[in-house]
Image: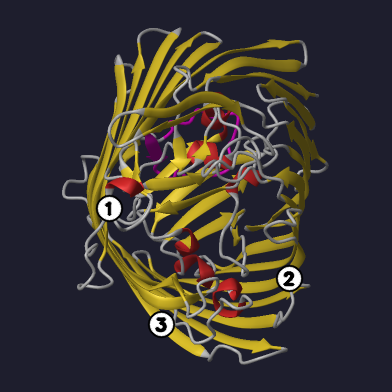
Amino acid sequence: MTYVHAQQVVFAPFDTTKIYELNEIEFTQSYKRAPAVPVQSMDSEVLTKLNTQSVADAIRFFSGVQLKDFGGVGGIKTINIRSMGTQQMGVFYDGIQLGNAQNGQIDLGRFSIDNLQEIQLYNGHKTDILQAAKDYGAAGTIYLTSKHPEFTRGKTKITGTLKAGSFGLANPAVLWQQKWTDSIATSVSAEYTYATGRYHFRNYKQAPDGTVLYDTTMVRENADINAVRAEAAVFGKLHKGSWKAQVYNYYSNRGLPGYVARNVYEHHQRQWDNNFFLQGSYQQKVLSFYELMVKAKYAYDYTRYLNPDTVTRYIDNTYQQQEAYLSVANAFTVYRWWKLGLSADFQWNYLASDVAGFVFPTRYTGYLSAVTDFNWDYVKLQASVLGTFVHEQVEKGVASAPRSVFTPAVVLAVRPMLDQLFDIRAFYKRAFRMPTFNDLYYTFIGNASLQPEMADQVDVGVTYRYQHPGDVLESVGVQADAYYNFVANKIVSVPASNPFRWQMMNLGKVQIIGTDVTFDMGFRFDDNWLMGLKGTYTYTQAQDVSNPNSPYYGGQIAYTPWHSASALLQLGYKGWHLHYSFIYTGERYEQSANIPVNYVEPWFTHDVSLGTQFNYKKCDFYVSVDVNNLLNQQYEVVRNYPMPGINGKVTLKITYQE
């Protein structure tokens, strides 16, 4: 993208009887520095054409990401960045973090792309001065931004989408955007997802001597889903400010397909989820040197888990989480090149359950952040510190001890030559993960004396951007980073004296060394033909260094491949587009014991999407046909959880504006 600015020219009132000679207005290219921390993003146009069903599917194309996917449309999908662990991730929806104090995991499969404007992934945290204190806390962050009402004509915009595909997929959605006044607009979105989840997979086993023990095709069972997402938002503009209020609800009833091993091929466990939140934000430039932002949220999450198997153990438990959150952020401009930020957050969490012996924990957390930011022509330097203060109470037993933790971060970006879009950057960040309620208090397993996980992150990288509209090669972008992470007090589960009971302990240490590389190229052959190419590559060595006396000391941690890569190719001709995507995940082990029995084979998939867009009167149409796993690759992301083979989807989207 080319950025321009103009010299300001002030004109006195015109006398129409005279001839005036106007001063020349000079347009020059400004060189906007690349983000000081590694960031990757996708906008709504890319997401629509990428042949993805959910946020989790799209994030697979970012470098440095490991996805855990248990299969199918309704399968639970979680991610981690640079092998830091799922609980070290912060997921933000419209600027406010999504919470799960129970287990620290956010299921990204429940977020559709139909109402998303952008997905951003940061290693470390954003370097905005005006942001909540919690934004500085996570080792890696994902920002999901819902669509803001935009009108190219008229004041009403209604978009209807229908997706249908393999495994019984039926996925209608509607988005209504309305402009009421110049300063007030609303957005209402709803979506229904149904799938049987029944797909064929190959069940194969070979003996050590090469003898094939069995090789058959089976059907994945109990992977169905019924889900409804509904949300509404009000957007307001103010003089030098804005505000937003929104409500969100997601309900799902899904089967949990379970593992396929040891002659067990079918499971009957089910899970019901009801996730609700109400949140709002207010931002205002109060004075020329002072800006204020206030955010607030209330969330209620309900989960029911049912295991009807009376032979093993019948389980029917419910969990109810509540969360309240308030943040006040302040930004001060001291000089043009020097800014200060101060933020204070408060969060309350409560978990209830009908599990026998449950302790009903309550957590009170305060966050205080201070940041100073220097931004000169050649150098950007930012330093911040986050203080986190935790106090817990339980109705039964002993609560975890109060904690006060301070975590600093320093970010540096240098542009050696202002006339070149080349940047060098580096950051150091210390982050910690508070143990979840399950870690601390789960019946017979939790350990209230657990210490938080501590993570140190170091990153050094370069970015280069070439922009030349009008040439055949319009743009080239390269981003490369080398990083080192060290996680101490890693929370792991170990056997207790009773072999049927495990206990949470601070035993783990993980050392992570890696490289992320991302590149993209844009071509324009004439007014009709376009081509885009994007690729990512990640090398990760994530070693378990917990116990030097262990025979498996230094082994690659579970489900972390040494090599992973992705590629995207887009061809555009007038209103048509063809997308091809490729994902590769290299060999891994399912345990830190890197022995043959734990070996997990590499896998890759090819996906293709063909679509067209056109308009008729007041309607814009978009139609696409997608084919996933084109070569019918039989693979597993998680051991013994087979993924779907070749499958397809048809999408029809109609947008009406007046």
Disc nearest the viewer among 1 and 3 = 1
Q: Which mark is residue 322?
A: 2
Q: What range is drawn magenta here?
A: 1-22
Please rate how many residues cluster around mark 2, counting C-alpha atoms within 10 Å: few if below 14, some from 14 to 19, many from 20. many
The amino acid marked with disc number 1 is: Asn
| Residues under numbered marks 3 and 2 in contact, where contact means CB atoms less than 8 Å apart | no
User: Residue 200: x and y, percent?
Assistant: 58, 25
- Can see residue 384? no
Disc nearest the viewer among 3 and 2 = 2
Q: Quadrant of the N terminus?
A: top left
Sequence-wise, the earlier of marks 2 and 1 is 2
In the drawing, does residue 540 fall left or right of residue 644? Answer: left
Q: Nearer the viewer, residue 310 or 559?
A: 310
Q: Quadrant of the C terminus?
A: top right
Report which residue position mark 3 lands on: 406
Q: Look at the picture and state if 199 lies above or below 490.
A: above
